[in-house]
Image (cartoon, rainbow, N blue to C red):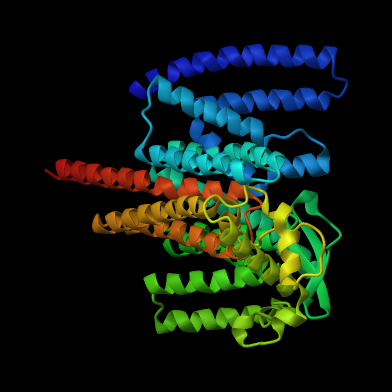
Amino acid sequence: MINTLKQLPWLMLGMGLLAIGIGATLGVGVSILDNPIYIIAGLIAIIAALVCLIYPKIGLYTLVAITYLRLSDVLVNFYGAPSIAKPFISLMIGIVLVRWWYYERPVQGTIKAVALVFGYGLVIILSIFRASDFTAVIGALDDYWKNAVISIIVVSLLTESKNLRNVIWSLIIIGIFLGTISVFQYLTGTFDNPYWGFGISSLQTIAGSSGGYRIAGPIGDPNYYSQIMLAITPLAFSRFLDEKKFIWKAIALYGTAVTIFAVIFTFSRGAFIAFVIVVMVMFYFHPPNPREFIIAGAVVIFLLPFIPKDYASRILTLSIFGNQTTVQNDSSLRGRSSEYIAAWMMFSDHPILGVGISNYETNYQSYSRQIGLDPRTEARSAHSLYLEVAAELGLAGVAVMATIIFVIYRAVSRAWSDLRKAGDIYHSEMVLSVGLSILGYLIAATFIHDAYPRYFWLLIGIGLSVTEVARSAIEQRILSYKTDVLENK
């Protein structure tokens, strides 16, 4: 009854807004717009806004889908549609603020998210004083607030264990959609087909002088695509292990397979390293028994024919395998080495606030000429999130980034431990999978810079949410136990 009364003002407000919105949309559409598609799109947007206003959790799942599919960019680039991400994010933060004001108090994780977001934003603002390209800083700061606010929205709305499960399954379904396209595209060789904008691929150097197609999904860059798909793999594998119903297990296993193959078909060396580390950490928490080893070995043998023949050659170009001439012979690694050294030199020259956000590219060539490894003359990126932060934001940025990572893993560790102490293994494994997902993303970020920060802040928001999710799950477990005791008396 209380929840119904709480929702009543939202229903009344929503119906009023719906009536006004439909009338306004039809009026504008008939009088100004010739294309009826704009009228339909306007009506859909109004209805979607109404649904999210009344049921904000649906808005949360929609935000996850829009962000991870990069749906707005696909619609803009392939269909000429207006951006939907920024208006939707603005709508969701507005809903969160109104609900705080009306009857909800921000959960503890929200305060942490706000503090981290504004702390990092403050460092960005301070970096203006060191930047040689002021315009780049202003543009980066504008983009930062639009992206970082996602973590605040997620933490504010992701407060129950069932919501976490739904968010995880939303990501798995997205991984299945993108992974299926990627696997089908690679195995059929249909690289010229962009698959509605979700299957971009490009012909690139694989190893030495050999080349081939690398899958890039909706992003257009194989390294970033491998990073976001790798983050889904431990979520899917965890659901395969822990879901009770066979159908969900089967879907999760399929999701695990296609996300792994999508990562392989990107030929990303950084993602390979990240995947190996994530598997090792997972084995630490779940040591496999001999039977599982045999099954895993059989699966690997079965899947080997589907792995590209050049994949091993690509991985063996990593210097960790003892190839002493790799950097000199591989133009990609020469460029990366130059970019890493330049980032360190920028940090050494400007250790407190760096050279300014988004100013690495502006300063790269002046350092590259001193290094002498990279013959390219265009602006380049740092190709490492952490070196990028150090070069552009100095020790101040490194301190805030380290704090963000520390807070995330303290939250995950405590939530996992509290749930296991309470005997809630199901949700503790769910929290662990979130930690592994973020771990894979952050390790992969060692080899690529933060060109698509919305994924980062989405995962940060999910990570910060596990504290409230664990509390909710434990309270629900205690309540269920008390109910059972009363019923048995």
Question: Where residue 336 appears, x then y in whole percent?
Answer: 69, 69
Q: Nearer the viewer, residue 359 or 80?
A: 359
Residue positioned 66% across, 42% down in the render: 137
Residue positioned 49% across, 69% down in the render: 278
- Spot the residue most to the left: 489
The image quadrant that residue 148 belongs to is top right
Which quarter shows the C terminus?
Answer: top left
- In the image, taking residue 401 as reference, residue 135 lies left or right, namely right
Q: Nearer the viewer, residue 6 or 204?
A: 204
Residue positioned 27% across, 43% down in the render: 475
Question: Where residue 262 appears, x then y in whole percent?
Answer: 67, 65
Instruction: Tell me if residue 179 can be seen.
Output: no
Question: Where residue 163 appears, x then y in whole percent?
Answer: 44, 43
The image quadrant that residue 427 belongs to is bottom left
Which quarter shows the N terminus?
Answer: top left
Instruction: Tell me if residue 202 can be seen.
Output: yes
Please give the count of numbered marks on the rendered protein.
0
Residue positioned 70% across, 11% down in the render: 23
Question: Where residue 344 appears, x then y in whole percent?
Answer: 60, 64
In this picture, is 377 found above or below 156?
below
In this picture, is 170 found above or below 11?
below
In this picture, is 42 found above or below 62?
above
- In the image, taking residue 192 as reference, residue 307 lies left or right, namely left
Q: Nearer the viewer, residue 453 or 290?
A: 453
